[in-house]
C-alpha cells in the first residue's frame, strides 16, 4: 500500500508540472497568437445581470464605461429596483453620458437559475446581435472588447470565453478565492484546453451572438440549469460552432470577500462539476499531492521517511503554485502562497461534499441538483 501511494504521489507531482506548463504556454506563448483586428469592431451589447453588491462594484462597472471600443451599449438587469446595486447603476448612468446605458427591472420569475432569470429582460431590449454576458465582480482592461471581438471574424466561432484571474487579498475569503482561481481554475481550464481540446466555459465573461443563442433554444432553455455557461458552450459546439478560450486574462475583484461566500461559491461549483462529468471530477484529486502525502504520512504511522516526503511535497507544491500565481497576477503578495497547503486540504472537503449533499442554496433559494445540473426546488 505504501509503495502504491508513493508512486501515486510522484505521478500527481508530474501532473502538477504538466498543468504549470500548460498555463505557461497559454500566458507566455499562445497569447501572442490571438487575432488582432482593429478594423473589425461590430457593435456589442454588454449584459450585466446584477443582484446585491460585489466588492468595488462601482469601480468594476465604471471600467465597462471606459472601454476603448467605438460602439457598444450596457444593459443592467435587475429583478427589483430596491436592490442595493440599483442606486450605484443610476449614479453611473448620470456620470457617463457618452455610453448608451439601459436599466431593466423585471420581477417576473422565469426559472431557478438566478442569473438566467435576470438576463431574460435584458436580452429582450438589446440592440445588437453580438452580446457579452459579464458578472458584476469583473473589472476589464480598456482593450477588452478589441481583443475578443476579432475572433468573430471567423463565422464558425460561436462563443469566446476568457481566462479569469483573482485580485485583492484583504480577507481570508479573498486569499483562498484568489489562490483557487489563479492556480486550480486557470490550471484546469488550460489543461482541458490543451491536453484534451475541450474548452471549459466559465460564465463570468461570455461573448456570443444572440442569433446563435436563439438557435439553441434561447436563454430560457437554460433557466432551470445551474451550469448554464457550460451547457451553452456544449450546445453551440454540437451546432458546429467553435468555442474559444481567450488567453487574455480579465480580473475578478475579491477584496474583502467573506470566507462564507468563498466557501459557499466553491461548494456550488463543486456540485456543478460533479454532476457534469464524473471521471473529470475524480481526476481533480490528481492535482492535490499534499492530500495524498498526508495520507501516506498517516498510513506510515508518522515514520521519519514519510514525514520528510510530506515536507518535500508541501514545499514543492507551494513553490510551484507561487510561481504560477505570480505569473498570473504579480500583485498578489508572495506570503499569500504560504496558505497553499491549507487551501489544498480545505478543497478536499469541498470536493467530497457533493457525494453527501446535492442541495444548493443560491440567492435565497434551496434547490436540488440533478443530472447536467438541472435544478428542482426542495421547498
Image: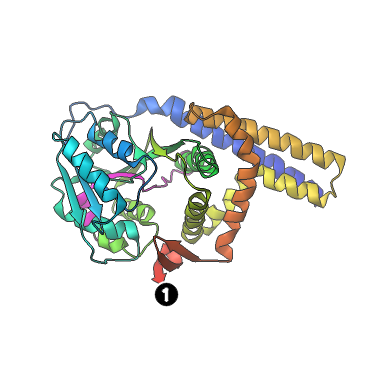
Quadrant where the C terminus sits is: bottom left
Residue 225 lies left or right of residue 92; in this view the side is right
Residue 302 visible from this viewpoint: yes
The 10 Å Cα crowd at callout 1, few under 14, some 14 to 19, many 20 or more, is few
Residue 353 lies in the magenta-colored region = no
**Residue 127 x %, y %:** 13, 47
Asked which secondary structure carries label 1, the reply is: loop
Q: Is residue 199 above or below residue 140?
A: below
**Residue 262 x %, y %:** 50, 49
Question: In the rendered structure, which segment of residues is drawn in magenta?
Answer: 194-217
The residue drawn where x is 46% and y is 35% is: 168
Q: On the image, which quarter does residue 317 sit in?
A: top right
Residue 218 lies left or right of residue 21; in this view the side is left
Q: Which residue is mark 1?
A: 379
**Residue 18 x %, y %:** 57, 35
Q: Is residue 357 above or below residue 330?
A: below
Residue 142 lies left or right of residue 191; in this view the side is left
Residue 208 visible from this viewpoint: no
Q: On the image, which quarter does residue 35 sit in?
A: top left
The residue drawn where x is 20% and y is 31% is: 69
Q: On the image, which quarter does residue 335 sit in?
A: top right
Q: Nearer the viewer, residue 227 or 140?
A: 140
Q: Report how many numbered discs are placed on residues in the image.
A: 1
Q: Nearer the viewer, residue 197 or 132?
A: 132
Amino acid at each position: 500500500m505504501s509503495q502504491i501511494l508513493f508512486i501515486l504521489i510522484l505521478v500527481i507531482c508530474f501532473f502538477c508540472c504538466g498543468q504549470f506548463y500548460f498555463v505557461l504556454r497559454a500566458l507566455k506563448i499562445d497569447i501572442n497568437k490571438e487575432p488582432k483586428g482593429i478594423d473589425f469592431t461590430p457593435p456589442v451589447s454588454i449584459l450585466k445581470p446584477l443582484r446585491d453588491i460585489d466588492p468595488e462594484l462601482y469601480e468594476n462597472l465604471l471600467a465597462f464605461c471606459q472601454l476603448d471600443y467605438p460602439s457598444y451599449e450596457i444593459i443592467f438587469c435587475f429583478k427589483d429596483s430596491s436592490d442595493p446595486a440599483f442606486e450605484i447603476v443610476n449614479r453611473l448612468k448620470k456620470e457617463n453620458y457618452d455610453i448608451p446605458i439601459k436599466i431593466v427591472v423585471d420581477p417576473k420569475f422565469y426559472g431557478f437559475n438566478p442569473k438566467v432569470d435576470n438576463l431574460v429582460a435584458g436580452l429582450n431590449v438589446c440592440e445588437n446581435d453580438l452580446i457579452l454576458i459579464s458578472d458584476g465582480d469583473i473589472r476589464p482592461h480598456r482593450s477588452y472588447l478589441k481583443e475578443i471581438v476579432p475572433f468573430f471574424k471567423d463565422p464558425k466561432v460561436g462563443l469566446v470565453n476568457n481566462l479569469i484571474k483573482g485580485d485583492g487579498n484583504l480577507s481570508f475569503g479573498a486569499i483562498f478565492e484568489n489562490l483557487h482561481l489563479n492556480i486550480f481554475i486557470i490550471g484546469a481550464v488550460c489543461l482541458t484546453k490543451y491536453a484534451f481540446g475541450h474548452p471549459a466555459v466559465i460564465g463570468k465573461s461570455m461573448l456570443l451572438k444572440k442569433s446563435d443563442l436563439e438557435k439553441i433554444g434561447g436563454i430560457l432553455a437554460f433557466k432551470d440549469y445551474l451550469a448554464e455557461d457550460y451547457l451553452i458552450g456544449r450546445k453551440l459546439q454540437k451546432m458546429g460552432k467553435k468555442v474559444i478560450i481567450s488567453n487574455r486574462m480579465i480580473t475578478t475583484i475579491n477584496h474583502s470577500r467573506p470566507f462564507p461566500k468563498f466557501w459557499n461559491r466553491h461548494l456550488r461549483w463543486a456540485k456543478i462539476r460533479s454532476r457534469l462529468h464524473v471521471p473529470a471530477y475524480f481526476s481533480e484529486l490528481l492535482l492535490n499531492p499534499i492530500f495524498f502525502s498526508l495520507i501516506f504520512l498517516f498510513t506510515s504511522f508518522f515514520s521519519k521517511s514519510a514525514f520528510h516526503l510530506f515536507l518535500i511535497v508541501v514545499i514543492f507544491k507551494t513553490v510551484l503554485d507561487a510561481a504560477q500565481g505570480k505569473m498570473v497576477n504579480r500583485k498578489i503578495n508572495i506570503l499569500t502562497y504560504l496558505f497553499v497547503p491549507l487551501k489544498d486540504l480545505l478543497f478536499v472537503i469541498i470536493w467530497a461534499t457533493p457525494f453527501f449533499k446535492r442541495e444548493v442554496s443560491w440567492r435565497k433559494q434551496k434547490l436540488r441538483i440533478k443530472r447536467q445540473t438541472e435544478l428542482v426546488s426542495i421547498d
